[in-house]
């Protein structure tokens, strides 16, 4: 953290045009729910008409799931210093089960708040925290199990459907049957389906009562596959301004969740800026901050200090905590013969603590007390896989699976408290061993949502691990992983910069979408169909805009054919004007249509004279437009 | 083709330093076979010693398959105007079944040769072509079926093994059991195994007798998964110089085959330059050039003209031809209702020809005559999938599978002539439909090698189709595809430039290697293990050099920690000096080693005092190096 405080504040209050300008060809829309304050944001991509040459039909706007929050809404004035609107505030308060506290509960939080030196760094509009009233449980799972459909659940049902019902029986809805493993997917998501999945523990809604700015979303294998992007500074690089900008950048490209993995200084203040400006759930690994508090000496960690950290973060609004409670003393030696030992930071911290104290992991021994905290704020568990493999050699070994089984036991305990829970998974796994991970996780963890990092399917491509892992991520998503933690090209080499974040997110949007297609998620193929139709009809701008990264597609195209006229040209630089196969196909169709028969009949009747006629016309491949 | 001829020649005779400089950390080695002129080139990556802190052991050099030819051999002086050494010339001649022709057989070839205006463009050392003696059959399949192990087969056996036997029982050979579909993989590849696979038609050795510069390689699912890179100019861009440079660039990154898909002018002369300088098999789609000869008017194509083109290219040394002989008249109408019709250029040309003439595809009706040409030069078939799907919506449909079944019939005919044959496959296929493609291909095409383009698993990411397709490519490779045709980021948007070629190849090397790991190819995991061990031991340079792209890995690392000292630092910019999980793991191991017990025993005996001792030492995470 080398920048001066004043620089930090200035930069954190301004976002670059790069992260807020409108997404090309799109506008923000809001779908109205059952109550006036329930408006679900989506992104609508407009399409041009099919060129006359190809039939001249109108093409419907395509609605897509939108994670970017108000930042991409041209009607919204960004003000980072004020934070985002608290869209969930009324819903939380009207349930009548929370109380506003007079100040922070955490001793560390109070100490930071009282330190005037930090004033220049501080987010100016922090609210007093909310907590469940004594004896109350404010988790979405608790409500779900009592049969209550919360506004959050209704919001999610609308959001997941992406207005596909508006397309009615359009050919764009044509879709291959999926192959889903486990529960059957409904044709449309209903609020009751959302409630039921949360009640069963098959899905979670990360939604801390202190993060009312968050637009509700769900993580479960019977919903759209989600992706997480990590941000966070380290002792060596990156400050507050950069982290807030990275957050907004990440959600612009489609990150459904963001984890703040900061390990540097001013973690507390940085986090406040991030959460107050985050329309997506924020996850953390609280052990990182706890370790900072003891000067990086793992042996000096204590339950009391860790507990204070959990409360500190819960009252800021962190939506889920990675807790490495499955790193048990007896599993640690199982890693000694590995090629890459323990590669999880949290896992190695806890392993070191266990060995140093020769005691069982305090996260495990205090697990029920952690549950008490989680349910008072509705923080979800992300049970960490501290012993995940760091190389394909170490995949699916006794340490990894021993920990996974323990996470299953802990899931049962969390659910006893109605605490929402997901399970973290690997890592580095060759393709033939991926399915076993999901099957075992579903069985041992009772269908709690699986949240995996990749997995990387080979270790030999540093600099390209967004690709080695997108392969594994797509497959594991298909098999049932609910959320995919992204990997960037800089994995194993350094902290990602903005371009790395974009590359990592797009690779993971691809993996998640490929998984949704394979599972047969309702409407998943609409966007593919629309884009392919646009491609076939040479609607270049529509092809770009329907893609995951319109800017990149346009840039790659324009390097060769920069002129606007080429955007509607009926050829491209790959084949040139004479060789376009799409154009030839269209000629074939036109021929059939002009002659009042379909091609099949023309051929079946053996009309050789029609062939001659087609030829006589010239049958030009390239009709000058 | 806007450049002047003199520019073309100059540029084609010089390669940039970018494509010829030595690959970092590597040297070219040659493994001696059973005869003096059989020397198999490989790349040896040297490794540093493990740092003393981690045990100080020596690490063996790792040998990897090398496609880059003499260009990366520091002892070789590149001379494009002379062409590469003819490593196979003696083997071809000593079989006694070929004759040298007085000149070119092709009328078109003779016409070009006689045109003095082309002199400035021409490769200066073209040889008179070879052809099988009357009645002879010179295919590798023909030899294999007669029980002959050719030098090419021995070369391939040595090459495929990558000297893993030299590692003896090193821990680096540890490998997960693979899951292979179909034939069992041997522990080591023998020349007899190569012969047997070729004889059965399960593998091909593309090796035209007029391409003696080619270093023999094999395409079959019981061998390493191969990748193909496409180069080629079009009417709109790219010249000879750029194409030769792209060839050398492509093989540097690991392309096993290169297809020249040129459709612009001077195809004949460009191809000569490429083949004379290509140490890898070169494939073409002869219909592209045939169409050029009739001014781009598909209806004017004739069998006679096409036949002349096949001979022209066969006598230059093209190793395999894509022939779209399965695009039958009755399949064409099946594409009319598709979202993206016919997207293969060759397929659409033949479809147009069929409709215009209302006759059956002349490639189908003259197939046996084509076989006669193929066996006279040992050109392999790559039976083209002209009706492959161009969108996920069109995957696995009646048109695609109808054509595939026809390709199976044609395979039987080719094999009757002992002509080597592989089958091209899609395209765009969602994950849940990929396996069906391989299963059907294996069944209907009698286990002839499958050669697929991707497949892309979603259509929504123009600009990133190397990734959408690497997912499908890895999976289809695992299921049994023998060669993967790469897709670059510029797919659907324009012709790839050098950076696109590199990105596409690396994505496909990843997919192919992930497939080899999953199938359990012998020794496939050695490189992963070595790289992971290097990573764990903070041998940064070894990590970079063992990767598929050392330059990129080093570049991404150095942007954050540029100093050489950091290359041996025991931390990296991701976590900083205090938080390195690998370092913590090493501390755990050291602790166990120092105390003369393994960690397991230390724990089982409940030695709390040892824990105290460990703590008292300080147990620093970061030992200053």
Image (cartoon, coloured by chain):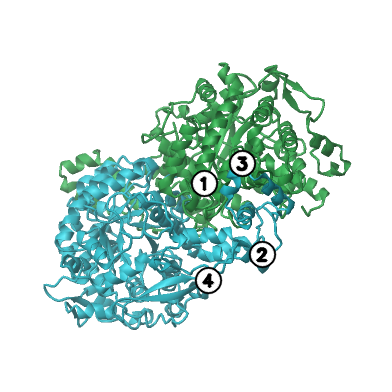
Chain colours: A cyan, B green
- Secondary element type, mark 2: helix
* Front label number (4 vs 3): 4
Q: Which residue is mark 4?
A: A25
Q: Which residue is mark 1?
A: B454
- CB within 8 Å, label 3 to label 1: no
Residue at mark 4 to residue at mark 1: CA–CA distance: 29 Å
Q: Which residue is mark 3?
A: B251
Label 1: chain letter: B
* Residue A482: percent from left, percent from top: 32, 57
* Residue A251: percent from left, percent from top: 42, 68
Q: Is residue B201 left or right of residue A197?
A: right
Residue in front for this viewpoint, B326 or B417: B326
Position above or below: B250 against B41? below
* Residue A289: percent from left, percent from top: 30, 65
Name the residue furthest left. Answer: A135
Residue at mark 4 to residue at mark 3: CA–CA distance: 40 Å
């Amino acid at each position: 953290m080398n920048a001066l405080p004043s620089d930090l504040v200035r930069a954190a209050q301004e976002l670059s045009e790069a992260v807020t300008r409108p997404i090309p060809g799109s506008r923000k829309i809001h779908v109205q729910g059952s109550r006036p304050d329930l408006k679900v944001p989506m992104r609508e991509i407009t399409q041009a008409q099919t060129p006359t040459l190809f039939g001249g039909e109108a093409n419907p706007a395509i609605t897509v799931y939108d994670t970017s929050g108000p930042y991409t809404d041209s009607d919204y004035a960004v003000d980072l210093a004020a934070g985002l609107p608290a869209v969930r505030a009324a819903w939380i308060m009207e349930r009548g089960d929370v109380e506003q506290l007079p100040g922070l509960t955490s001793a560390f939080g109070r100490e930071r708040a009282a330190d005037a030196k930090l004033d220049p760094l501080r987010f100016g509009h922090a609210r007093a925290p909310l907590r469940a009233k004594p004896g109350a449980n404010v988790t979405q799972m608790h409500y779900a199990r009592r049969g209550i459909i919360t506004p959050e659940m209704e919001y999610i049902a609308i959001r997941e459907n992406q207005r596909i019902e508006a397309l009615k029986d359009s050919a764009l809805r044509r879709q291959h049957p999926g192959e889903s493993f486990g529960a059957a997917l409904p044709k449309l998501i209903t609020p009751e389906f959302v409630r039921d999945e949360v009640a069963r523990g098959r899905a979670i809604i990360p939604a801390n009562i202190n993060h009312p700015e968050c637009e509700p979303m769900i993580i479960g294998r019977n919903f759209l596959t989600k992706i997480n992007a990590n941000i966070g500074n380290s002792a060596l690089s990156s400050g507050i301004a950069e982290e807030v900008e990275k957050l907004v950048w990440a959600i612009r490209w489609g990150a459904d969740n963001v984890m703040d993995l900061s390990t540097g200084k001013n973690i507390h203040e940085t986090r406040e800026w991030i959460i107050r400006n985050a329309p997506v759930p924020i996850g953390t690994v609280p052990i990182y901050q706890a370790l900072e508090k003891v000067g990086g000496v793992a042996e000096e960690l204590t339950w009391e200090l860790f507990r204070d950290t959990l409360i500190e973060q819960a009252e800021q609004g962190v939506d889920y905590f990675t807790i490495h409670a499955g790193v048990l003393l007896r599993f640690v030696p199982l890693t000694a013969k590995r090629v890459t030992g323990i590669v999880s930071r949290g896992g190695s911290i806890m392993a070191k603590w266990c060995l140093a104290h020769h005691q069982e992991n305090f996260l495990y021994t205090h697990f029920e007390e952690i549950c008490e905290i989680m349910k008072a704020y509705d923080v979800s568990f992300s049970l960490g896989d501290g012993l995940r493999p760091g190389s394909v050699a170490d995949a699916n070994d006794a340490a990894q699976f021993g920990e996974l089984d323990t996470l299953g036991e802990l899931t049962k305990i969390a659910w006893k408290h109605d605490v929402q829970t997901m399970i973290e998974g690997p890592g580095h796994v060759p393709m033939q061993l991926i399915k076993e991970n999901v099957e075992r996780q579903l069985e041992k963890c009772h269908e709690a949502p699986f949240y995996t990092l990749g997995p990387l399917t080979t270790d030999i491509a540093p600099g390209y691990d967004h690709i080695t892992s997108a392969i594994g991520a797509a497959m594991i998503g298909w098999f049932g992983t609910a959320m995919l933690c992204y990997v960037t090209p800089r994995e194993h080499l350094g902290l990602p910069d903005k371009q790395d974040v974009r590359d990592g997110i797009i690779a993971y949007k691809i993996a998640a979408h490929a998984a949704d297609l394979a599972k047969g998620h309702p409407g998943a193929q609409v966007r593919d169909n629309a884009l392919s139709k646009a491609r076939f009809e040479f609607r270049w701008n529509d092809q770009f805009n329907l893609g995951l990264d319109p800017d990149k597609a346009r840039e790659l195209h324009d390097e060769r054919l920069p002129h606007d006229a080429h955007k509607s040209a009926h050829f491209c630089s790959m084949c040139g004007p004479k060789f376009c196969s799409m154009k030839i196909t269209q000629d074939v169709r036109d021929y059939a249509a002009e002659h009042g028969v379909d091609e099949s009949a023309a051929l079946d009747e053996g009309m050789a004279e029609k062939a001659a006629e087609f030829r006589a016309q010239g049958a030009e491949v390239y009709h000058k437009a």
